[in-house]
Image (cartoon, grey):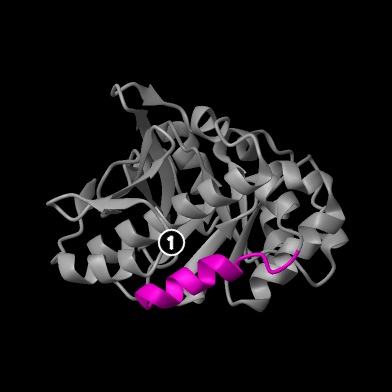
Amino acid sequence: MKTSINTSFKSADEFELIHSATDYALRRSENGWVSGLFYHCEITSVFQPIFSINDNRTIGQAAYIRSKSNDDVELWPWQVFSLASKDDQLIELDRLCRAIHALNYYFNHDSKLDHLFVDVHPRLLESVKDDHGRAFENFLDLIGMKTSRVVIGIPAIVNRNWKLLQHVIANYRSRGYQIAANYSGTQSDWMVELGSLYPDIVRIEASDLIQHDAINALADTIHGFGSKLLVRDIETTKQLATVLHTDADYLQGNLLSEPVREITKIEVLPVSEAEVH
């Protein structure tokens, strides 16, 4: 079961003050939800809660973009990013998306304990050579949100480039962000290659975890590096029951709660005790 998190919206005047201090094309609806404009597209946020097994509560929100063109045609995220053919356009769009996510999280969620999970586009990581996360840190400072409450998701494709992965982890961590990387392959030795620059969270899809030959050994290895294991894309009660038999830390997926245009939390896991045991 999921519930909405009841908050009092922060003032429109505060939004206008923040807006005036940025170059972003932003707008705020009457209910407090923020959207932005990129070329002829309106971009806004949806959030999917992340549940902690050990804490038995929602500990964060994963943010994703939703967009539509001027004629109200819904667009996939890749369609929006395809409009940014040049590096400077890509950087502008990616930063705009994260600013929108941060504002919607800030204006509609009062918990000081939860974390905002945002992904970065792989092209951004290659285009920005140094100081990854600096521009976003400046924006977070503007709204009074600490970088330690933000988890930066590194795209799986970056795992192919160890030097780049190490470089961006070091950059983001130096600014106080937490890092989430995606597990890749069938072996757990990929984390060894990172040396001391292991991520705070390792994400793996539920379907991949279930097919892994040694699920608990994988979890033990991840925990051995001081990281947490987040199992995402949980779609069925069978997947959830299997995951609950492992030493996973965090859960995410449409079975628990689909991404929606509001901040919600998971109260009860949709699986029976019989299914778990």
Relative height, residue 9 to residue 77 (above, below)? below
Task: Tell me: 59 left or right of 202.
Answer: left
Relative height, residue 192 to residue 244 (above, below)? below
The C terminus lies in quadrant: top left
Residue 206 versus residue 81: which sits nearer the camera?
81
Q: Could you tell me residue 12's position as x and y percent?
A: 16, 65
> Neighbour class for label 1 at 10 Å: few (<14), some, many (≥20)?
many
Residue under pointer 1:
116
The part of the image, by quadrant, that contains residue 134 is: bottom right
Q: Amino acid at mark 1?
A: Leu
Residue visible at 54% across and 50% down in the picture: 92
Queried whether the magenta region covers residue 132, the answer comes back as yes
Residue visible at 58% across and 77% down in the picture: 176
Q: Which residues are magenta?
A: 130-144
The rendered magenta stretch, by its main secondary structure, is classed as helix
Q: Could you tell me residue 160's position as x and y percent?
A: 82, 44
Task: Tell me: 40 left or right of 8.
Answer: right
Residue 213 versus residue 2: which sits nearer the camera?
2
Task: Tell me: 12 left or right of 50.
Answer: left
Q: Is residue 225 visible?
A: no
The N terminus lies in quadrant: top left
Q: Is residue 218 visible?
A: yes
Residue 61 versus residue 121: which sits nearer the camera?
121
Task: Tell me: 251 left or right of 188.
Answer: left
